[in-house]
Amino acid sequence: MIIVMKPEATTTELEAVKNKITDAGLNFHLSQGSSRTIVGVIGDKKKIATLQMNSFGGVEKTVSITEKYKLVSRDFKKEDSIIDVNGVKIGGGHLAIMSGPCAVESKEQLLEAAKAVKACGAQFLRGGAFKPRTSPYDFQGLAEEGLKMLREVADEVGLNVVTEIVNINDLDMICKYADMLQIGARNMQNFQLLKEVGHTNKPVLLKRGLSATISEWLNAAEYIASGGNYNIVLCERGIRTYETFTRNTLDLSAVAAVKELSHLPIIVDPSHGTGRWQMVRPMARAAIAAGADGLMIEVHPHPEVALSDGDQSLKPDNFAVVMQEVRQIAQMMGKTL
């Protein structure tokens, strides 16, 4: 249930509503918009059904939310959420570009990539220090040594770090180095990990699962929000279908769907979405035109020798062309980079 307060509702009236909820053994979350405050009631459905809140002073109306996800729904918050990562805004007309190699291989490789993406306008350095790979024989990442490289290079160049957390036991360590935590597609429904990330104050990039529905994806985001961390950015990275020409099928309709169903910002990863560097440029353009709040693009100075996902990585000069086109489309869409 959500409780919509009147624009003129007083602090005392809001406190009375909050006290009623907690006295019933339920929890609440506040969404304070420009004109109204919305109280989201969380807990046992039977207890919520017994609440009679319309008679309370300052209450305009109550609305039952039918979706299982509540806090991330558009019903709970009408305005687009804007996630701030060290002054870089994502959502609400602000575009974020997260670029860099799939995996951290060496400091030299990382620094070359970071300087290139920074020069083109990226605000985030992406790179995996822990790599969940399909084969146990593939490169698994440099672990904490890779995290140290990410932090050192990002600080030197002036970028934020977004990197994936794979193991719940590594959370504290990764939080020391990263500005934004990435939950990868394979961990989208690792519910214990989602809960723990929800208890941190780190912004979270939540990728869509390989075969996840949009509802399942938003429910995964709900796990994080229910822990108290509302700094969530969704990432469409393609889903598994019967098509074999591309690595995945990039579902750009998910951008429009998320915009309708949720207030969370959403970015698109055309690198994983297609698996082919030749397709990254047109899909990046299409993503921004569809309304995405940013892009995650793999960039490697020498993709022909990359230890991971070289086939889908752009060279710096190709990335520069993508960024020029993205700026033009963003301007048409009324968004800033």
Image (cartoon, rainbow, N blue to C red):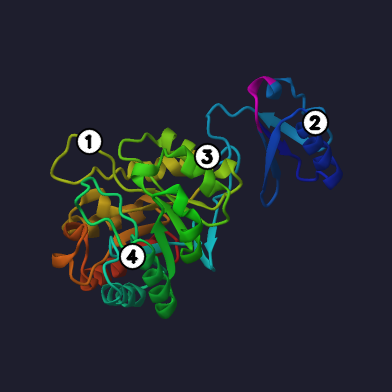
The residue indicated by pointer 2 is 23
Tag on residue 241?
1
Of the numbered discs in the image, which one, if any, rests on residue 139? none
Earlier-in-chain disc, 4 versus 3: 4
Q: Secondary structure at mark 4?
A: strand
- Secondary structure beneath label 3: helix
Q: Which residue is mark 4?
A: 99
Residue in front for this viewpoint, 155 or 289: 155
Quarter location, residue 19? top right
Q: Position of residue 129 (x, y in %)?
A: 34, 61
User: Is residue 251 toward the left or the right of residue 234 in the image?
Assistant: left
| Circle 1 SS class | loop
Tell me the kind of residue under disc 1.
Answer: Thr
Disc 3 marks which amino acid? Answer: Tyr
Toward the viewer: 190 or 123? 190
User: What residue is rendered at 70% in x and 45% in y?
Assistant: 36
